[in-house]
Image (spheres, helix red, strand yellow):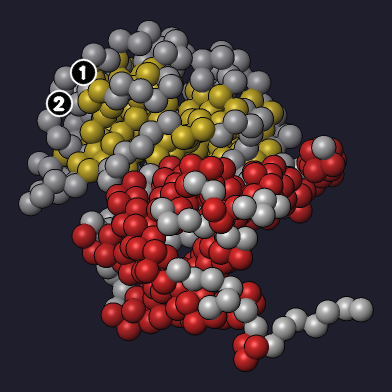
Amino acid sequence: MLGGGADLVWHLLFGVEFSVDALLSPTHLVLAAAGVLIVTGSLRAAWRDPARESRRWLARIPAVLSLALSLSIFTGFTQFVHPLVDPWAEVSPVAATAASEIYQVDADGAHQTRLTISRGASDGSPVFSADGAFIFFTRARAIAGHDPVADVFRMAADGSDATRLSGAPRWYLGPLPSPDGKLVGVSFFRQDTQKWTIGLLPATGGDARLLTDGQSNDILDGFSPDGTRLLFHSDREGQDQIYIIGVDGSGRSRLTSGSSSWGGSWSSDGRTIAFNSNRTGRLQIYSMSPDGSNQRRLITSNADDWLPSWSPDGTKIAFNSNRGGHAQVYVARADGTGQQNVVQNSGVQLDASAPGWSSDGRHLLYAASTNPPADATPFFRQALGAAGIIVQAALLIGILLLGLCGATLPVGSLTLIVGLNAVLLSFLQDQYRLIPGAILAGVLCDILLWRLRPRIGRPGSIRLFSVAVPVIAYACYFLSLQLTTGIGWSIHLWLGTIVVAGIIGLLMSYLVLPPFGATPAVRA
């Protein structure tokens, strides 16, 4: 109750936390402490049972579950340095950037929800259909012996039932459904001209009907509200400029000139087009009439703002901005005031697409990756990965020593504790391939527990147990990586990290049993 009330006041004073902020926020840590007190009720009850060591295995399960859930709370709040969440030691993927997924967020920044799990592919450019029933997006994938492709997909609004719409495999950009729902406008790369061109796909799937000639780079930006015209930008006259063209390919006209302009979005009343331009030296968002007149700056900031997207009722505009050093999604009023960051997560990287509004204006779609790109500096991957293993080794052996001291760690409990923790953590970043290795580690540690029978009265068994458990756990972890994606670290690094994890376990054992028969000082 205290933590909940304090958290409400904290949010009012300092705003809602996201990403690592949410994990280390002081009031959230109070709530975490409350959670530990709740889940350890049966553990404390077992400690008060003088016959606990003679109880049958099933009778000791509640205490073991208390230990498992306590560990999971600690690892959940330190997930940003956990090797089961971010396996930094794996071989870096071939792609230059981390795979992106599609997310939905309320227009006020609440209820951020991931909609896709691409499993090795990369999902991007999401946009709702006009009726809000479907989401169109692209899914990029590698093809052995060929250039990578990005197909056009459609899925239900809840992220289920993804279906490929594009025919011939190509690299497609930004699918945009027409207002009547019959067509999907796309940009795709033509191998014959080595240029981007615009086409129209049937909403039910098939091959694209060409709209531009492919002699310049033409990128689709949006439909007019009545569905008769298209906005696109092109380098056909040098720098990128914004054009209008009919859906039949006729009536092309240029709307902007001078500095590069692109990323146009048509308001629902058809009276205003928002776009971005670098005419001030930075990307800024402007507005203009559909004939190109009345151009004025719409969004004011000291950062780069790009890819505006009008809300269906025309009262708001969403856009991307890198203020603060990280690209995030912002929402502002139609006149550019009231700008609000609705993602507030510096740990994600947005893909190159505009935010997509739901038909009722309540939700936004965006695509982002949550891990640094594969070409992040080796030092970053190595340092964070090794630090994570050291921290988590201390948490694991600390919980297990707590169970040993209270005689609440029967044979079989390590498999339950380590396995359950691995399953729960794997859902955070879908690292399910690492679960078997964690279960194997738990089984091996249980065999060790059975053979050593560590007790407080036998310091040597406690020391050996404390060293061996983290060594076994992370040896199985690296074995799992090697059998799945491969280990990207040198033998010096991964083997040395295992050794340090064992040393951490040894040092933790001295907190339980002081050396040379010493005992903690007792205050009179």
Q: Residue at x 51, y 15 (%)?
A: 359
The image quarter containing residue 199 is: top left
- Taking depth in this image into account, of 319 and 419 the one nearest to the observer is 419
Query: The disc labelled 1 sits on which kind of residue?
Result: Gly
List x then y, in percent, for residue 57: 47, 47
Q: Residue at x 49, y 82 (%)?
A: 460
Side of 406 relative to 210 (left or right): right
Q: CA distance from mark 1 to mark 2?
A: 7 Å
Q: Secondary structure at mark 1?
A: loop
Q: Label 1: which residue?
A: 205
Q: Is residue 319 visible?
A: yes
List x then y, in percent, for residue 282: 56, 53
Q: Is residue 485 above or below residue 111?
A: below
- Do the residues bearing badges 1 and 2 touch, measured as CB atoms within 8 Å? yes
Q: Label 2: which residue?
A: 167
The quarter of the image holding the N terminus is top right
Of labels 1 and 2, earlier in sequence is: 2
Query: The disc labelled 2 sits on which kind of residue?
Result: Gly
List x then y, in percent, for residue 286: 58, 36
- Taking depth in this image into account, of 370 and 522 the one nearest to the observer is 522
- Taking depth in this image into account, of 516 and 65 the one nearest to the observer is 516
Q: Residue at x 62, y 79 (%)?
A: 513
Q: Residue at x 27, y 15 (%)?
A: 203
Q: Is residue 477 visible?
A: no
Q: Residue furthest bottom?
A: 516
Q: Is residue 401 above or below residue 75?
A: below
